[in-house]
Amino acid sequence: MNSRLNEQQVIKGRVLTRHAVNRQGGLHLQYFVQTENGPVTVEIPNQEHVCFVQATDATALLASSELRGVRRSPVALSCFANTPVEALYCVDGRQQRNLNRAAKDLDIELFESDIKVEHRFLVERFIALDAEFYGHFVARTGTNAVSQQQPLFIASRARQAVSTIALNAISLDFECSFAGELYSVGLYGQTTEGCVYQKVIMVGEAEETDANYIEWVENEAQLINQLISWFAEYDPDIIIGWSVVTFDLALLYRRAKHHGIALTIGRDNHPLGWKVEDKYRPETLSLPGRVVLDGIDWLKAAFYQFDRYSLEFVSQALLDEGKAIHNVDNRMDEINDLFLNNKPALAHYNLTDCRLVWDIFEKTHLFDFAIERAKLTGLELGRVGASVAAFNNLYLPHLHRAGYVAPSKPASDGIESPGGYVMDSVPGLYQHILVLDFKSLYPSIIRTFLIDPKGLVEGLTQVEEQTVSGFLGAQFSREKPILPMLIKNLSEQRELAKAHHDAPLSQAIKIIMNSLYGVLGSRGCVFHDARLASSITMRGHEIMKQTRLWIEAEGYKVIYGDTDSTFVWLGNDFEQEQVAQTGKSLAEKVNQLWRDKLTQEFKLESFLELEFETHFEQFFMPTLRGSVEGSKKRYVGTKRQTSGELGLVFKGMEQVRSDWSPLARRVQYELYERLFQHLDVTTYLREIIDSLHSGELDDELIFTKHLRRNLEDYTAKSAPHLKVARALCDINQDQRFAKRGARIEYVMTLNGAEPAEQTSNLIDYDYYLSRQLEPIAEPILSILKTSFSEVATNQMSLI
């Protein structure tokens, strides 16, 4: 280490966490970076917060005595009102806050004042995850120069880089008592060589066991201290888990605080902390040098969907394996019993949970997805959501180089753009329905029609020949638009990813591209302008309507359309072997018509691409309940699987919704199977009604809901699952049923909703008939020229 001191060097690595630190009157940017030679702390001294103000407002704003230290400087930039701006520099966060307050008091606009300095430094240099830093290593001095600290590199500049450095991850999970006292912590991972690492730190006296991964400690405080030592030794870059922030790390923090233990599990001896006291959320977590990925959040970010997001449910769905415990739903009692009587079994359960989370991450490529998303967006590795911040990271450096600063607030106030196009459906039972989808329709519209915030500002001042017309008076400049260029780059990267079978990268790009319209349509984005959003959605309406006309001109019937999908009926007698070729030919015909139209009318290159997506051999489009009009976003069809078998596909129906009883969902599935296979439907329904009233189906009448927030935070209190949650708290004297995420099971009785395991009244079978079975059966029965009331009445007379 000493031989490296004061040498001018370059280090390259992956930026794990970012921080701004005020020290000795100066602002230092601090980046924790993993390099090929291990973790390094990079600091960039003498930095400043920066924002912008219109040049005409600068003098009045800086007249206050408390702002005398703010530095101003002319820059070659303008705001969207095309007036020059000056840059304002603050040496610390306090001065920046004073500046913001003064501007608000004087009603003076500040531009980009909310961009954190540690992010701006990277974004302006197009640095996302991987970077090169230029500077030198220095010796640490003072009381902080301890063995657990990593090398310190003082940098003067940085640039983007390409890196393939593998990051070291660990899956972490705690087991605890009802009161939250720690029993054990499980740690599971795999080295880059593929070797398994596993450890459980367990409170208790050492026992003879074959589980050589157990490390015994005397008490909870020793467990925490041993875990701190483990972090220093194993030194993971990434921590994964299931509700790992809101439960595991929050619990660890509270227990360490209870014992007065400094929880120094971050790098450089930094403690785990929270930016907002008692708000244990991913966005408030502070753990310098380590990235935390929660399995639930990242599955949702990658657009995986499950009825429930418990570890048991997701692991069973993805891995066909569940928790190593007998009674999952009442596992706390069993965990307590294992801690008292069979600690090795508890250690196995603890470690299994860790491994299940790891296997889910591996199965769904979440590690790769998180890394690719950070590389694409410039968001801090581990940050979920934040689509507005991702847009800013992508857009701002290009905007600045084009001579503009971002607006201080959205342009639109109360003017909203319409949503996606949804045409009226033609209800009925069909054979041979084609679904033709526009590939990434909204990004393609942005790219084709040059829709761009900067382009709108410039286009409104240009002559018509230099612009492309949008909607609500929008005109977009043809000169160097930024957003279409970004989409072009992303599209090309996605095609390369698909060619290389890089599914995580392809998925990350798809999600980012599709989020761009949503950002422009959100009032939370300073670039929001109804003219931008409407020029996307209203153009989409126009495209879908014209596409329908062209398809019907070919002699086919369009029965439905939704945002970017067109449903085409080929006719019930269409030849099966001609379906695929017809779908591809139709798509190419429409694509060519769009290329011709846009060249002739707009002098634009078309990036619209219609694809043959799906063939439903049989298809049912229901009516709206109580109406003859066709429904929207609801249908059922049979689709040939890769195995060659026909499978049922439900869209928007009760079958895919978790707020319907298992009975309703099963019956609906079987009804449509019978409909499509031309089997008897009414006899089957009568058998179900008979079994329902005889009590044979009681196990399928249980509703399951999870609290999305703590019980006291609900404004509407009358929902059945909330009523049952309150009852469970009272009956069991257990407030767990009032906490966010609590699983509530109930049935409908003659006295309303009651806990499934503690009913005091008879089940209300008529409720299940009229509110569960009738709504799902009626659409099918109407096709068969009968009704649920007729079927039910005939059956009831026989009971």
Image (spheres, rainbow, N blue to C red):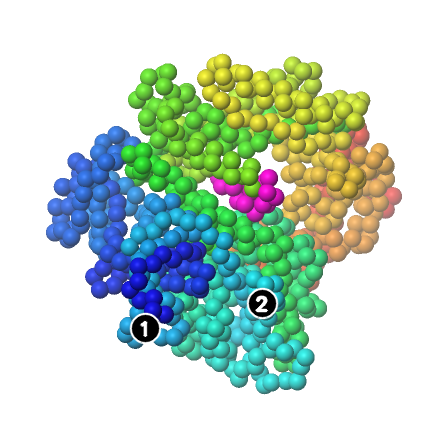
Residue type at mark 1 is Asn
Quadrant assignment, res 197: bottom right
Q: Position of residue 684 (x, y in %)?
A: 84, 42
Q: Position of residue 393 (x, y in %)?
A: 39, 44
Magenta range:
498-515
Does residue 654 appear left or right of residue 177 in this picture?
Answer: right
At a point 23% along the width and 59% down the height, the residue shown is: 26
Q: Which mark is residue 188?
A: 2
Residue 547 colored magenta? Answer: no
Does residue 256 appear left or right of residue 25 in this picture?
Answer: right
Type of secondary structure dominating the magenta stretch: helix
Quadrant assignment, res 410: top left
- The Cα–Cα distance between marks 1 and 2, rounded to whole angstroms, is 30 Å
Q: Position of residue 463 (x, y in %)?
A: 33, 17
Report which residue position mark 1 lands on.
Answer: 144
Residue 737 appears in the rendering: no
Residue type at mark 2 is Tyr
Which of 289 and 497 lies nearest the eye of the viewer? 497
638, above or below 571, in the image: below
Residue 463 appears in the rendering: yes
74, above or below 292, in the image: above
Q: Would you call the spot at circle 1 few (<14 residues within 10 Å), some (14-19), or many (20 or more)?
A: few
Mark 1: which secondary structure? helix
At a point 71% along the width and 42% down the height, the residue shown is: 770
Verify CB contact (< 8 Å) between mark 1 and mark 2: no
Q: Position of residue 747 (x, y in %)?
A: 68, 55
